[in-house]
Amino acid sequence: MAITKDVIIGELIRDNPEAVKTLMSFGMGCVGCPASQMETVEEAAMVHGLDLDKLITALNE
């Protein structure tokens, strides 16, 4: 399944535990915070000031 900007971080981690390493490498250290249960990849990238396209590409590798 391709990871898109609309995927919820909590679901992403639940379905792809290996994604935690990628998220943390982008500086998203709070992957287990309550917000991750309702925040999309796009919203998280925006909050953390990340390049969404680069994040999506890395998550899909």
Image: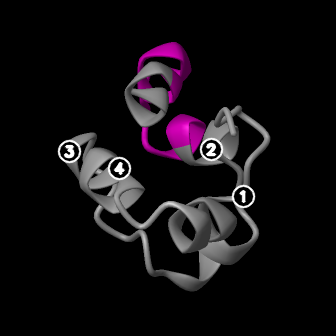
Q: Quadrant of the N terminus?
A: top right
Asked if labels 4 and 3 touch by Cβ distance under 8 angstroms, the answer is: yes
The mark nearer the N terminus, 1 or 4, is 1
Query: x, y percentage for residue 36?
Result: 60, 70
Which quadrant of the view contains residue 37?
bottom right
Query: Distance between the Cα atoms at labels 2 and 1?
Result: 6 Å
Query: Distance between the Cα atoms at labels 1 and 4?
Result: 13 Å
Secondary structure mostly seen in magenta is helix
Kind of element beneath mark 1:
loop
Kind of residue at badge 3? Ser
51 in magenta: yes
Q: Which residues are magenta?
A: 45-56
Mark 3: few/some/many CA within 10 Å (<14, 14-19, 20+):
few
Kind of residue at badge 1? Ile
Kind of element beneath mark 4:
helix
Front-most of residues 28 and 18: 18
For this orientation, the residue located farthest to the front is 1
The mark nearer the N terminus, 3 or 1, is 1
Kind of residue at badge 4? Leu
Query: Distance between the Cα atoms at labels 3 and 4?
Result: 5 Å
Query: x, y percentage for residue 46?
Result: 57, 36
Tell me the number on the disc at residue 23: 4
Q: Quadrant of the C terminus?
A: top left
Which residue corresponds to mark 1?
A: 8
